[in-house]
């Protein structure tokens, strides 16, 4: 993410996070992007996805999770 001000971004963990510390955090209010980072390394790298790609990923994982 080039030169994006991350000081006002709200990161959130999944409601299914079990508190083990092995979580990712998501930020959805970025300008036209969805951010993803490792909760153990908040100042580390951030992956970004288009909102469409993120929605596709979330749908796919929700569908996969319902088969267990």
Image: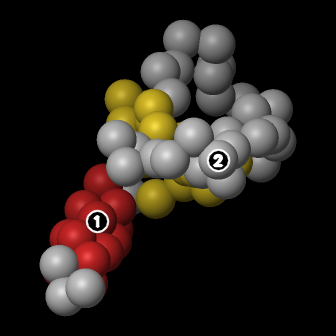
Q: Which residue is mark 2?
A: 20
**Dot 1 and dot 2 residues touching (CB under 8 Å):** no
* Mark before the other along the chain sequence, 1 or 2: 2
Q: Is residue 8 above or below residue 33?
A: above
Sort mark 1 into few (<14), some (14-19) or many (20+) by Cα contacts within 10 Å: few
Q: Quadrant of residue 58?
A: bottom left
Relative vertical location of residue 46 with respect to residue 56 in this rendering, above or below:
above
Provide residue 26's location: percent of width, then percent of height: 47, 42
Residue 13 picture location, percent across and down: 47, 38
| Residue 52 visible within the image | no
* Relative to 6, residue 28 above or below: below
In the rendered structure, the answer to whether residue 45 lies left or right of residue 61 reads: right
Q: Is residue 21 left or right of residue 61?
A: right
* Callout in the foreground (1, 2): 2
> Quarter of the image containing the N terminus?
top right
Disc sitting over residue 16 in the figure = none
Q: Nearer the viewer, residue 22 or 30?
A: 22
Residue 29 visible in the displayed image: yes
Position of residue 24 measured from the top left corner of the image (x, y, whole percent)? 58, 49
Q: Residue at x 77, y 41 (%)?
A: 40
- What colouring does the structure picture have? secondary structure
Quadrant of the image occupied by residue 68: bottom left
Nearest the viewer among 29 and 10 is: 10
In the picture of the structure, the residue carrying the numbered disc 1 is 58
Helix, strand or loop at mark 2: loop
Q: Which residue does the image show at 17% across and 78% down from the upper left?
A: 66
Residue 38 position in % (x across, y down): 69, 48
């Amino acid at each position: 993410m080039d030169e994006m001000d991350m000081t006002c971004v709200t990161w959130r963990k999944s409601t299914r996070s079990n508190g083990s510390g092995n979580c990712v955090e998501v930020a959805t209010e970025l300008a036209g992007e969805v951010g993803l980072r490792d909760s153990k390394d908040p100042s580390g790298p951030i992956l970004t996805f288009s909102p469409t790609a993120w929605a596709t990923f979330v749908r796919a994982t929700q569908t996969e999770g319902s088969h267990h």
